[in-house]
Amino acid sequence: MSLYDSEKGLIFKPKFDSNGLLSAIITDVKDGQLLMVGFMNQQAIDKTLDSNIVHFYSRSRQKLWMKGEASGHILNVIDIRIDCDQDALWIIANPEGPTCHTGVKSCFYRRVKNGVAKMNSLEMIE
Amino acid sequence: MSLYDSEKGLIFKPKFDSNGLLSAIITDVKDGQLLMVGFMNQQAIDKTLDSNIVHFYSRSRQKLWMKGEASGHILNVIDIRIDCDQDALWIIANPEGPTCHTGVKSCFYRRVKNGVAKMNSLEMIE
C-alpha cells in the first residue's frame, strides 16, 4: 500500500466535481442522527478545518457560508472522515440548536412512504 | 401549511441539480453507521422504490447501476427520508456484505487528522 494511493493511502487529497465541489454529510455526535447534507469547495474545507466550525459552499447563493452565521445554530466539528475516492466528507458535529432552517433538529424530517411512492407522498417523522 | 409546500408539505417532489442528480446518503439500519454517499437521478429513485434495492447514477460511468450488481453486496432499503428542500435522500438500509468496493464495511474508513490538516494527513479508523 502506498501512502500516495488515493483510496488506501494517507494523503488528504479531496476530489472535487466539475463545479469544484464535494458532498459533506453532517451527523450529530450525541446520537448519530443525520442532520444535513451540503457541499464544500476547497475554501469551505479550509475554513472548516481552521475554525472547527462547519462551513459550506452555497450553490444557490454561489458563496461560502458558515452554517449558523445568521441563526447562531452553528455546527462544531468533532471528527472528519473521508470516503474511499475522497469525493465526500463525513463530519461528526456537536450542533448548537436545531440544524434545519425550519427550526427542527434535522433537515430529514419526512419519510417517503414505501409502497405508495408512485402517489408521491411523504409523512412527517415524529 | 399546504400539502404542496416543498418544505413543509407532503408531496414528494425531488429537486435535481443541473445534471439531473441529487445526493443519496446510505446508513446501516443495524448501527446507524454512514456507509456510502452516491447520486441518484429520477430513474435511480424509481428503480430503488420499485425494487427496494438501492440504485445509483454513476457520474463517472454515466449510467444507472444497482449497488452490488457485480459484487452481490446489495443494499436493501428499510426506510427513505428526504430533506427540507428535497434535494437529498437519506436511505436507511440493510447491507448484504461490505458496502465499500475496497472490501470494508463503510467507505468512510479514514479520518482527516485534526490540527495537522495543512499537512494533508489521514489516519485509518480501526
Image: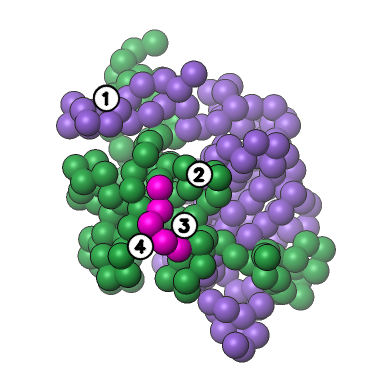
Chain colours: A purple, B green
- Which range of residues does the magenta coloring cover? B94-98
Q: Amino acid at mark 3?
A: Met
The disc, 3 or 4, on the residue closer to the chain's N-terminal end is: 3
Amino acid at the residue labelled 4: His
Q: How far separated are the C-alphas under marks 3 and 1?
A: 26 Å
Using a 10 Å C-alpha cutoff, classify the residue at mark 4 as few (fewer than 14 neighbours), some (14 to 19) or many (20 or more).
some
The residue furthest top is B1
The residue pinned by badge 2 equals B30
Could you tell me how far apart the alpha carbons at marks 1 and 4 are, in whole angstroms?
29 Å
**Residue that numbered label 1 is attached to:** A121
- Closer to us: A112 or B85: A112
The amino acid type, in three-letter code, at marker 1 is: Ser
- Quarter that holds the C terminus of chain B: bottom right
- Depth-wise, is mark 3 or mark 2 nearer the camera? 2
Q: Position of residue A8 (x, y in %)?
A: 57, 78
Residue picked out by circle 3: B36
Q: Which of the two discs, 3 and 2, labels the residue nearer the N terminus?
A: 2
Q: Residue shown at 32%/21% (left/top)? A: B10
Find numbered disc 3 in the image and state the secondary structure of the residue it sits on: strand
Q: Which residue is mark 4?
A: B73
Please indicate whether residue A12 sits to the left or right of residue B96 in the image. Answer: right
Q: Residue at x 80, y 69 (%)?
A: B116
